[in-house]
Image (cartoon, rainbow, N blue to C red):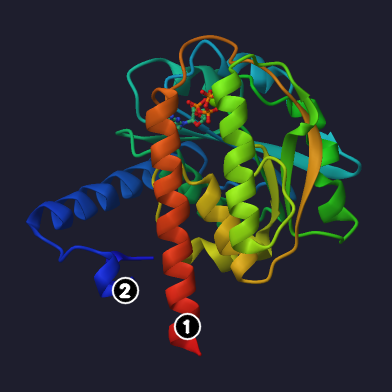
Amino acid sequence: MAPTQRHRWLTLPENRGHRRYRELHRLALDSARSDFEQRHPHARFGPVLALIAAYEEERNIGGVLKDMPTLIGDLEVSTLVVVDGGGDNTAQVAIDAGVFTCVLPVNLGQGAALRLGYELAAEHGARFVVTLDADGQNDPTEMPTMLEPLLDGTADFVIASRRLGVDRTTDRFRQAGVQLYAWILNAIVSQRLSDSSNGYRSFTIELLDDIRPHLVQDQYQTAEVVITAASRGWRITQQPTVWHPRASGPSKKGGNLFFGLQYARVIFSTWLRVTVGNRRRR
Ligand SMILES: Nc1nc2c(ncn2[C@@H]2O[C@H](COP(=O)(O)OP(=O)(O)OP(=O)(O)O)[C@@H](O)[C@H]2O)c(=O)[nH]1
Ligand SMILES: [Mg+2]
């Protein structure tokens, strides 16, 4: 959603800085698209698209791509890596692995990179999209489990849950945060999710087409996707997962406190936007 479509009192008046940022953002997206079209002129994805936003993950992404399934049942799986800028060799590792690769010239944030991926998925024929991290925290071989509720028609959106499955990480503060934010989100959108911040997710393309115009968060966007989908009446469910420690390197989300505050900001601003939007429609 463009800032002008949001409620006026939720946004500051657009100044030259904002406008410049928006124009540069647009330019970066256009450049990534033309990079994709040049590299894959006749791209046609399989019915299942595994979508990975990757920011400086040259040491981790190869391992993730190596384990990626190419077939689930009789459905072909394609993989798309959206390289979110950065100064390392992530793009080359993805290209060498032979997967679809789209390279942003600058770092826009995981949310912005995933939005671009959702658009490409719809434009190139995917029916189901599975998002997962590039750092090895999600196991690609669990993808059939992640798709099951979509394929049997019982849900439109599946979120992996480390609390229903196994959490192999040891950061107690982060684990408490996962529980706290799931509790808050459930209270807001009347769901019963145990791990609403997990980035390992699967969606039908119909759901993504519907919520895409309402997504604005460039980073810490997992809550925004849940609140938007739930408020628009889509069916959300969860599946157990094994949550691994990062394969290597530090978290890119900042320290726990910063991460937590940013996450809370996204929950609050999305909830406000959705609530006010619903009231105005009535
Ligand atoms: N943080 C961050 N991640 C990005 C960005 N763009 C793409 N990503 C990818 O988004 C995924 C999640 O980022 P992480 O930094 O691992 O965040 P997280 O998994 O929520 O947090 P940790 O548990 O600390 O690893 C990874 O695959 C990143 O490479 C970006 O601008 N910032
Ligand atoms: Mg991670």
Q: Tell me if 192 is positioned left or right of 103 in this view.
A: right
The quarter of the picture where residue 65 lies is top right
Earlier-in-chain disc, 1 versus 2? 2
Q: Is mark 1 on a helix, strand or loop?
A: helix
Disc 1 residue lies near ligand 1 with CB under 8 A = no
Q: Position of residue 121 (x, y in %)?
A: 59, 51
Would you place residue 13 above or below residue 165 in this image?
A: below
The quarter of the picture where residue 229 lies is bottom right
Q: Which amino acid does label 1 sit on?
A: Arg
Q: Position of residue 141 (x, y in %)?
A: 80, 27
Q: In the image, what residue occupies the spot 52% across and 10% down?
A: 59
Q: In the image, what residue occupies the spot 63% across and 45% down?
A: 182
Q: Tell me if 145 is positioned left or right of 66 in this view.
A: right
Would you place residue 210 above or below residue 107 in this image?
A: below
Looking at the image, in which quadrant does ligand 2 appear? Answer: top right
- Location of mark 1 (residue): 279
Q: In the image, what residue occupies the spot 63% across and 58% down?
A: 187
Q: Which of marks 1 and 2 is in front?
A: 1
Q: Position of residue 191 (x, y in %)?
A: 71, 58
Residue found at the very far bottom of the displayed protein: 282
Q: Tell me if 10 is positioned left or right of 129 in this view.
A: left
- Location of mark 2 (residue): 7
Q: In the image, what residue occupies the spot 68% across and 18% down?
A: 244
